[in-house]
Image (spheres, rainbow, N blue to C red):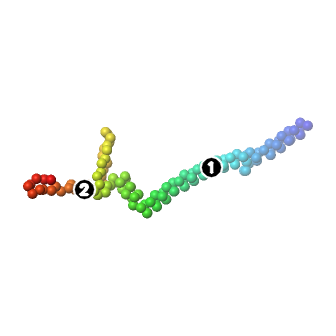
Amino acid sequence: MRLITLALAALLLLIQYPLWLGKGGWLTVADLESQVAATRAKTEQLKARNAKLESEVRDLKDGLGAVEERARYELGMIKSNEIFVQVLRKDEKPAVMMTEPPPPPATKVKKDGRKD
């Protein structure tokens, strides 16, 4: 009787081995599911990045607003007849201007010789 019990236990262990550790076993399936979840998360991140880039490209192709915004913030450019005001903190240095400031307005001289 004892021999039959040991043989059945051994067979049970042999049957359980592929279920847990085999090619389609639970451990392999759990590992593959975690890889699929990580890949899906990465794919979602890449889709969001692609959508952002596509939106930016479409905006650059269609409108001048994005070009103007980039010129203002990245290059420090201003439009003509526009006043540039920069507020600095105590330890901050002023930004470098990429555009030349407009010439000062000409002063008018009245007939009596005084400047206006």
Check disc 1: other Cα within 10 Å, few if <14, some if 14-19, many if 20+. few
In percent of the image, x 31 and y 44: which residue is there?
87
Q: Are marks 2 and 1 in contact (CB under 8 Å)?
A: no
Quadrant hosting residue 7: top right
In the image shown, does 53 or 31 lie closer to the viewer?
A: 53
In percent of the image, x 37 and y 57: which residue is there?
68
Badge 2 amino acid: Pro
Residue 40 percent location from the top left of the image:
60, 52
Q: Nearer the viewer, mark 2 or mark 1?
A: 2
Task: Say whether residue 3 is left or right of residue 64.
Answer: right
In percent of the image, x 10 and y 53: which residue is there?
114
User: Cα distance, mark 2 to mark 1?
Assistant: 58 Å
In percent of the image, x 39 and y 61: which residue is there?
64
Residue farthest along the bottom direction in this orientation: 62
Q: Which residue is mark 1?
A: 37
Check disc 2: other Cα within 10 Å, few if <14, some if 14-19, many if 20+. few
The mark nearer the N terminus, 2 or 1, is 1
Quadrant hosting residue 20: top right
In the image shown, does 107 or 50 lie closer to the viewer?
A: 107
Q: Secondary structure at mark 1?
A: helix
Residue 44 percent location from the top left of the image:
57, 52
Q: Secondary structure at mark 2?
A: loop
Task: Say whether residue 106 is left or right of residue 75.
Answer: left
In the image shown, does 114 or 6 lie closer to the viewer?
A: 114
For the N terminus, the quadrant is top right
Badge 1 amino acid: Ala
Residue farthest along the left direction in this orientation: 112
Q: Which residue is mark 2?
A: 102
Residue 94 percent location from the top left of the image:
30, 46
